[in-house]
């Protein structure tokens, strides 16, 4: 019987990678611009909001502050009809201002560049950026990646008023998984996932769509093979998965073991 593929973590890239996310970015930009605390105000960014609170409006909600999500049970794909009506007095509804968000994004990335050079930063989206701080720890007198992550959080907040959440890992994959699955729930808004945590953290991810790179269609495809969790994915036969799904199957199997051999700055 063919043995399954195994990985040797001692031979895998091990760096200090941060995946930094600006918390509820559009809503936070609007909150700061209006003098509110982004974590306390109930604010939504809505396309075509009514100019009067006595009219409902019919726009798509592009972003919501954490308090608005908690109070009204909405997400970033909600509509005006999902909000309670008449609108509560403490709800702030604003139209989107993309120029503002791009300018704040530029300022935040300038803060990141005071900690790393251009070769060690990769902008993933308007609100998420990867940083390789491996070579920066000594320069900033930091003994750990968590310590420098805290410094970055403080500086971004002081200069822009925006709160950031940080995932830390040996590679971009583990940093992203730490961000999405733990950091956003932690009080200090940071979490660290290393190779040693794969079994206790990565394999504990139950919903396949909570795993980076798995959407609804891929989830259904995996479930048709009897794969219902990341643990199942990591213990499926690699050669069979690779044959059935091609390079995507190979990549998903490797990711389930926390393996990501990409480096920032490389395509």
Image: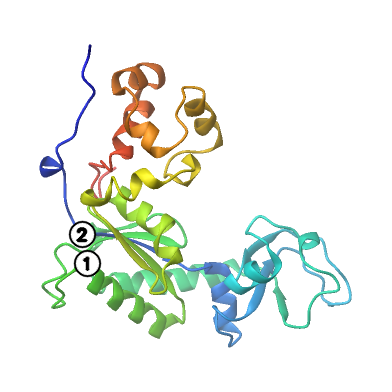
Q: Point out residue 255 in the picture as x, y percentages from the top left corner.
A: 32, 39
Q: Residue furthest top?
A: 1
Residue at 28 percent of width and 46 percent of height: 198
Vertical relation: 151 (above or below) 173: below
Where on the picture, by quarter, is residue 115? bottom left
Question: Which residue does the numbered mark 2 point to in the structure image?
Answer: 16
Q: Which mark is residue 145?
A: 1
Task: Pick whichever, 128 or 6, lies toward us.
Answer: 6
Quadrant that contains the N terminus: top left
Q: Point out residue 155 in the picture as x, y percentages from the top left corner.
A: 34, 81
Q: Do the residues labelled 2 and 1 touch (CB within 8 Å)?
A: yes
Q: Which mark is residue 99?
A: none
**Left or right side of 162 for 76:** right
Task: Pick whichever, 102 or 173, lies toward us.
Answer: 173
Q: Which residue lies furthest to the right in this view?
A: 54
Query: Which element type, helix, strand or loop, lies under badge 2?
Result: loop
**Left or right side of 192 for 100:** right
Residue at 24 percent of width and 53 percent of height: 194
Q: Point out residue 26 in the picture as x, y percentages from the top left corner.
A: 56, 68
Where on the picture, by quarter, is residue 46? bottom right
Q: Point out residue 168 in the picture as x, y percentages from the top left corner.
A: 29, 60
Query: Which element type, helix, strand or loop, lies under badge 1?
Result: helix
């Amino acid at each position: 019987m063919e043995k399954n593929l195994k990985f040797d973590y001692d031979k895998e890239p091990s760096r200090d990678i941060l995946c930094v996310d600006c918390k509820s970015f559009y809503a936070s930009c609007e909150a700061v611009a209006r003098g509110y605390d982004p974590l306390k105000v109930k604010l939504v960014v809505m396309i075509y909001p009514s100019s009067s609170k006595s009219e409902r409006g019919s726009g798509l909600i592009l972003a919501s502050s954490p308090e608005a999500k908690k109070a009204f049970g909405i997400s970033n794909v909600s509509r005006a009809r999902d909000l309670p009506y008449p609108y509560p007095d403490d709800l702030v509804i604003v139209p989107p201002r993309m120029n503002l968000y791009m300018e704040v994004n530029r300022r935040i990335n300038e803060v990141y560049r005071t900690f790393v050079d251009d070769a060690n930063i990769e902008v993933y989206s308007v609100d998420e950026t990867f940083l390789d701080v491996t070579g920066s720890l000594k320069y900033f007198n930091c003994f750990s990646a968590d310590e420098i992550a805290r410094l970055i959080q403080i500086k971004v907040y002081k200069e822009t008023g925006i709160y950031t959440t940080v995932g830390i890992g040996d590679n971009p994959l583990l940093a992203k998984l730490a961000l999405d699955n733990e950091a956003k729930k932690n009080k200090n808004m940071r979490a660290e996932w290393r190779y040693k945590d794969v079994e206790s953290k990565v394999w504990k991810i139950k919903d396949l769509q909570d795993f980076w790179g798995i959407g609804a269609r891929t989830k259904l495809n995996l479930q048709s093979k009897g794969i219902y969790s990341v643990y199942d994915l990591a213990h499926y036969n690699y050669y069979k998965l690779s044959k059935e799904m091609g390079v995507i199957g190979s990549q998903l199997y490797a990711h389930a073991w926390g393996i990501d051999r990409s480096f920032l700055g490389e395509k």
